[in-house]
Amino acid sequence: MAVQILVVVNEVLSEKGLMLKRGSTGVATLIAAPSSTKNGSGTRDPEMQSTQKSRKWYFGMKAHVGVDTESGLIHTVIGTAANVHDINVAHALLHGEQRNVYADAGYQGIEKREQAGSTRWHVGMRPSKRRKLNLNDPVDAIYDKIERLEAVIRAKVEHPFRILNRQFGYVKTRDRGWRKNTAQITTLLGLKKYR
């Protein structure tokens, strides 16, 4: 039902010319789940998993979102367990009409998995590699400028997560199972378009 709501909202926005579908941006965010076993069954949520990010461990799920690069409107929402790598879901975030896809450094190597097509991936440089750029070198300065320009485009996908976390207060899962939580996230992000 939640996916159908998002589809209808996207159709209305496309008819009004608000969603251009020339480019797409994909990103995922971790959403924590209660790791406590102090519940009726005495167990953790079996559908949630643990993953490591920045040397810290998190228990929960991931929300993967595909956003139109020009309008910043959401066209796809996919929920998975936290241990599913972003690259494994990347192609499902695409709507098929985009020419360019912008993604953060977590999608390194996605070009090798690309199916035949005219989609061009613009994946962010790893922060450790970017710090090593010598800005006095003309070639490195160009790479840095490209990274800055692409970062502006990739930033549009972070806005829906800010609304989800801050305005809707969805920083922790509310139900057991990532499917129910994905339905709620999809509904909230569909509502976000009209705020």
Image: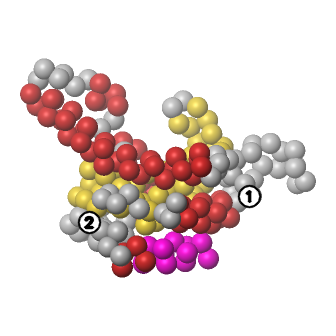
**As shown in the figure, which amino acid type bears the numbered disc 2?**
Arg
Per the rendering, the mark at residue 175 is 1
Q: Is residue 69 left or right of residue 38?
A: left
**As shown in the figure, which amino acid type bears the numbered disc 1?**
Asp
Total marks shown come to 2
Q: Say which residue appears at 22% left-offset and 25% top-offset.
A: 133
Q: Is residue 84 left or right of residue 21?
A: right
Q: Is 94 one of the magenta-colored residues?
A: no
Disc 1 secondary structure class: loop
Q: Say which residue appears at 74% left-offset and 58% top-offset.
A: 175
Residue nearest the observer in this picture, 42 or 19 = 19
| Residue 64 on image: x %, y % | 49, 56
Q: Say which residue appears at 34% left-offset and 28% top-offset.
A: 128
Q: Residues within 10 Å of mark 2 (few under 14, many from 20)?
A: some
- Which residues make up the magenta segment? 1-11
| Residue 183 on image: x %, y % | 62, 66
Per the rendering, the mark at residue 21 is none
Per the rendering, the mark at residue 22 is 2
Disc 2 secondary structure class: loop
Give the mark toward the camera: 2 or 1: 2
